[in-house]
Image (cartoon, grey):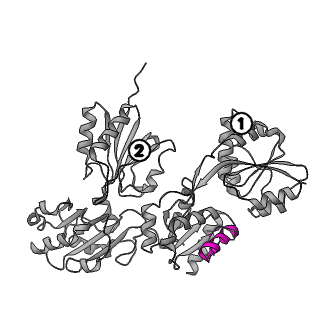
Amino acid sequence: MTEVKGKVYLVGAGPGDVAYLTVKAYNLLGQAQVLIYDALIDDQLLQCVSSNCLKLDVGKRGGKPSTPQAEINKLLVQYCQQGKQVIRLKSGDPFIFGRCTAEIAALKASGCNFEVVPGISSALAAPLLAGIPLTDPVLSRCFAVFTAHEPDVLDWEALSRLETLVILMGGRFLPEIVHQLLQRGRSHSTPIAIIRWAGTPTQQIWTAQLDTILEQTAGLSLSPVVIVVGEVVRLRNYLQTEKISSHVKTSTMSTNLPLAGKTILVTRASGQSSEFSDRLTAFGATVIEMPTIEIVPPASWTNLDQAIANLSDFHWLILTSTNAVDYFFHRLIAQGKDTRALAGVKIAVVGQKTAQSLKKQTLQPDFIPPNFVADSLITNFPEELQGKKILFPRVESGGREVLVKELTAKGADVIEVAAYQSRCPNSIPASAKSALQNRTIDVITFASSKTVQFFYQLTNEIFSHNSEICIASIGPQTSKTCHDLFGRVDIEAEEYTLDGLTQALIKWAKNS
């Protein structure tokens, strides 16, 4: 028997956004069986792995409980020896303050196969994304990168003589950094830039002089930040693509796009938000994803399996969401059947998106109501319902009570079965929480009543007084839930689809 050998990849995640991953890093994430990641890893990157991948958070943050390095080393060796493909995901580049030495030593001592995959360090990316070049023929012929995690051990005399300084892990020690540089002869008017959450939608930038930066950032949490000191900071106003205030998110999008300058929070389920986000980004928006729903299998497959075993007894199959489509056909195949089992069953779907999901199964719906809502399905149903047996796979928690009630009132025998369940996530992505707290979001979008309910549950204290943030709804049912919980809806799609919601946002942006 051939021994299965595992491998550990120490991968650089770049500054944050998935767009700044290397192609190799992205491909490796898709193949990962075990993901061991740090605290500063953006939540979007965690969605690049398969649903079967084991994800272990071993993040290290100053002043907070963290996984001991010895335990991290043990995990890497353990899963590698089990024959797993392990990704050790580190912020930035693994070899720039990435603490790789101990991990590689442990892997080598245990005979584990490993590879280091480079990433874009925040030391380089953060200044660039802030519009600050680290070198210039006149202003900066060299630069130094260092961590201020232990300021007492640094040679400030030597550092103060260099033209440009890039300082990591220096937020807590900003007063000490300013003091040391001024004491060693740097001018009080030396420009300094503070770049927080570089490369993410919540990126913020403060620029000032050494003698005024402490006043400007007083009381703020400066973590994680990259600090740039030197005359090159003055070039930012000349080189940046869009003029912005000193502490507002940067934008590299064209200002001619209809959603340019707008930051939009997308609350769709994890794994379903990317297409909508891409659509908004294409129109110039800055998008922050905050999945408020997790879609998982039902507690039991029994009722759905029984219905699939007796599909020939049904006249119609009604599917009202892409989740219903995905889980129904997943279970159909798991039961050793395929689409031929539906040969005598007509299919009705609610919405073009659901119809597109059905087409991926090589099937065309027999009926799509004109207004993409359940009420329209009942009103426009193409045949008499008296005596018809209908299979309705739906979310386990229920819903669509009106649909079932009206179909039953017209004489149909509706069999409801749980095909999946939706639940509220345990936490909020750090980027979304920061944006809500710092009032840097213009619009929050909701594509279902459940997303509204779970968002309210997750963020009630943070969002309760954010009346300046617009609330955008995909349709009447979602709007009703918004009114119930928030007391308002500012934007509602005229066509109850994601395209319709996008167009409603564009129309709002033009008038705002």
Please name which of the two marks, 1 or 2, marks the residue nearer to the observer.
Answer: 2
In-front residue for pair 489/347? 489
**Relative to 258, does residue 291 appear above or below in the rendering?**
above
Specify the label residue 12 is tagged with: none
Residue 356 location (% of width, % of height): 68, 52
- What amino acid is found at the position of numbered circle 2 in the picture? Leu
| Kind of element beneath mark 1 | loop
Q: Residues within 10 Å of mark 1 (few under 14, many from 20)?
A: some
Q: Is residue 267 visible?
A: yes
- What amino acid is found at the position of numbered circle 1 in the picture? Asp
In-front residue for pair 73/17? 73
**Residue drawn 18% across the image and 73% down it:** 178
Residue 43 location (% of width, % of height): 44, 56
Quadrant of the snapshot with the N terminus: top left
Specify the label residue 35 is tagged with: 2
| Real-space Cα separation, disc 1 to disc 2, in angstroms | 34 Å
Quadrant of the snapshot with the C terminus: bottom right
Q: Quadrant of residue 226?
A: bottom left
Any magenta on residue 492? yes
Q: Quadrant of residue 309?
A: top right
Image position of 402 (left or right of 10) = right
| Disc 1: which residue | 338
Residue 367 location (% of width, % of height): 80, 54
| Kind of element beneath mark 2 | strand
Q: Which residues are magenta?
A: 473-496
**Residue drawn 50% across the image and 73% down it:** 463
Q: Quadrant of residue 306?
A: top right
**Residue drawn 79% across the image and 39% down it:** 311
**Relative to 106, does residue 319 appear above or below in the rendering?**
below
Question: Contact (CB < 8 A) between labels 1 and 2?
Answer: no
